[in-house]
Image (cartoon, grey):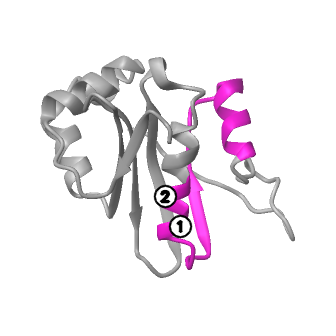
Amino acid sequence: MPPFRFSTSAVISNDAVLALYESVGWSAYASNPELLCRAIKDSSFVVTAWSEDGRLIGLARAVSDDATICYVQDILVNPDFQGAGVGRGLFAQVTERYQHVRQTVLITDDQPKQRAFYESMGLAEGSNFAPEPIRVFARFR
């Protein structure tokens, strides 16, 4: 058994959430703790990963209509646990929950390591879709 466990029902303290987001350098999220915690609470689905000693080491969250689309908002893993299957397990939990929807969408930073990870999970970038290309549009504020 891996040295971590997944939960879809764990109560997460605000301090644990902030520590996790800060561990991966997501300061835009961590700079407004109240908004971040509200976003997690109001997500359609949240799965967490916990170390053997009870520390929050990973989190994935999705927003979905539970019919046609699942938007994976965050997948993050404490750097001390990256490469151990935590991120893969979190993503698997989300995709299993939403296996019946037509579209799974994720927007992420332009980092080679992230791109390789998401492509290894079966996601395609931009217009690399089959059977026909599509366009992706987004706005950030």
Q: Is residue 35 above or below residue 16?
A: below
Q: Is residue 113 magenta?
A: yes
Question: Residue at point 58% right, 37% down?
Answer: 85
Given the image, on which type of amino acid does mark 2 rest? Answer: Gln
Quadrant (top left/top right/bottom left/bottom right) for the C terminus: top left
Asked where in the image residue 107 lies, by quadrant, the reply is: top right
Please state which of residues 107 and 115 is positioned toward the viewer in this rendering.
115
Please state which of residues 7 and 109 is positioned toward the viewer in this rendering.
7
Q: Is residue 83 above or below residue 100?
A: above
Residue 93 in picture, x, y percent from top left:
49, 58
Q: Is residue 77 above or below residue 101?
A: above
Mark 1 = which residue?
96
Q: Are marks 2 and 1 in contact (CB under 8 Å)?
A: yes
User: Magenta region: which residues?
Assistant: 92-120
Question: Residue at point 32% right, 27% down?
Answer: 20
Q: CA distance from mark 2 to mark 1?
A: 5 Å
Asked where in the image residue 56 lies, by quadrant, the reply is: top left
Residue 31 in picture, x, y percent from top left:
23, 23
Q: Which mark is residue 93?
A: 2
Given the image, on which type of amino acid does mark 1 rest? Answer: Glu
